[in-house]
Amino acid sequence: MRIGMLTGGGDCPGLNAVIRAVTKSLIRQCGAEVIGIEDGFLGLIERRVRPLGWDEVSGILATGGTILGTSNTASPFAWRGRDVAAEVVAYQRELGLDALVTIGGDGTMTMAARLGEVGGVPMVGVPKTIDNDIAGCERSFGFDTAVATVTEALERVETTGQSHGRVMIVETMGRYAGWIALEAGLAGAADVILLPEIDFDLERVAAVCRERHARRRATLICIAEGARPVGGTLTVERAVAGSPDPIRLGGVAHLLRERLQPRVDAEVRATVLGHVQRGGSPTPFDRVLATQYGNEAAHLLRRGQFGRMVTLQDGRLASVPLAAVAGQNRRVPLDHPLLVCAREIGVCLGEAG
Ligand SMILES: Nc1ncnc2c1ncn2[C@@H]1O[C@H](COP(=O)(O)OP(=O)(O)OP(=O)(O)O)[C@@H](O)[C@H]1O
Ligand SMILES: O=P(O)(O)OC[C@H]1O[C@](O)(CO)[C@@H](O)[C@@H]1O
Ligand SMILES: [Mg+2]
């Protein structure tokens, strides 16, 4: 058996743990040859691959990023104005691949499925993202690490906020889903948590800050990059040319700071955490989850269960058809127990009233 493997989309902690587990499982279970494809689908377009053996994947469990590199702008169906999908499929055949392991988000899964439809090799997907927003998957690896990083940041920001009696705003990543802000906000004892799923009422947030200033000096606000005020729009930082999902969010913390400042006596400061949340070594939880996902991907390959993505459902390893994942986005349901819990312990979610 000859298996290709690539990492696509934004990187996240735990990618190397998956690469290691897939490779070691396949070598041990069936003596398979594993071919690493560099920089996601770009490596298939530019014909850049390298063999992955036991030594190449040893010692990488705890390292951040991806040893294979990644890309979020390379589409074989629209590469520099040309459709090169047929050439990519031909290259897969030249390499003698029996299947492809694609470790990525919704975009990577969609692309892998599309390549399969035009004659590409069968594939098995592994869900990665710090955002935890992949359909059919209750925990993507990388999320736990991001939550740990944001939690530490909130705690650090809180002590300086206390010293100065300020309103401190911390902005998290997460795109259109509020999972990172919600879990880190709870773990980091934020007073206000603002999510993309609940448009926030500025007057309500200001009232909480004023009330806290009188009682507790400081207010800690955790806001997801995709949050927006009632009647407002998303805060877009930039558009990335060539990316199938070109919008990059960012900066809503600054918008909130500007609008809050005239409404409160305390000084307001904003911190945008950015890629700090996506880098570095995975937590033990993510190392274990990524290892299990990689091992399970090898099982699917050996059983010939293609066109599926490994996943976690009700705490158990499982797999779902790619068609159920492609083009989807898993957001925080409004009746989620963590939202209920947050409200009941007095966290403001920006809701009016
Ligand atoms: N809608 C799409 N149709 C076809 N191909 C796509 C699509 N979206 C993404 N791709 C391909 O998948 C690659 C990765 O996609 P994208 O940048 O959206 O990352 P992702 O896998 O969704 O991860 P994340 O969004 O978490 O960074 C792109 O470079 C592109 O080749
Ligand atoms: O690295 P880039 O292209 O700026 O993308 C940032 C986006 O990717 C993610 O880190 C992961 O999907 C999002 O949370 C964030 O909005
Ligand atoms: Mg995506």
Image (cartoon, helix red, strand yellow):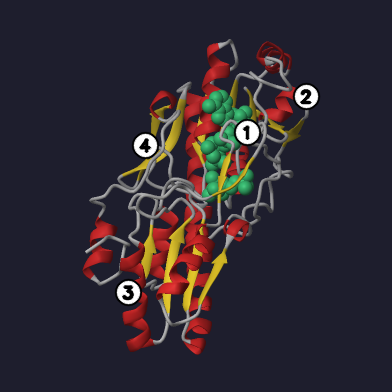
Q: CA distance from mark 4 to mark 3?
A: 36 Å
Which quadrant of the structure image shows residue 52? top right
Find disc 2 in the rendering and name its residue: 47
* Residue closest to the eye, 250 or 324: 250
Left or right: 148, with 324 as reference point: right
Amino acid tagged 1:
Ser
Mark drawn on residue 136: 4
Q: Which residue is mark 3?
A: 208
Disc with the residue nearer the chain's start (3 vs 2): 2
Give me the C-alpha separation between circle 1 and circle 3: 39 Å
Q: Within 10 Å of the Cα at label 2, are there few (<14), some (14-19), or many (20+) other Cα atoms?
A: some
Q: Label 3 neighbourhood size at 10 Å, few (<14), some (14-19), many (20+)?
A: some
Q: Would residue 91 be found to the left or right of residue 217 on screen?
A: right
Q: Nearer the viewer, mark 1 or mark 3?
A: 3
Marks 3 and 2 close (CB-CB < 8 Å): no
Q: Identify residue type, mark 3.
A: Val
Image quadrant containing the N terminus: top right
Which of the image's four quarters has the C terminus? bottom left
Q: Quadrant of residue 33?
A: top right
Residue 289 at what x, y percent from top left?
Answer: 47, 49
Q: Which residue carries the number 1 mark?
A: 243
Q: Is mark 1 within 8 Å of ligand 1?
A: yes
Near-viewer residue (311 or 54): 311
- Compared across the picture, whether 53 is left or right of 126 comes to right
Q: Earlier in the sequence, mark 1 or mark 3?
A: 3
Q: Earlier in the sequence, mark 1 or mark 4?
A: 4
Residue at the (35%, 53%) spot, across then down: 230
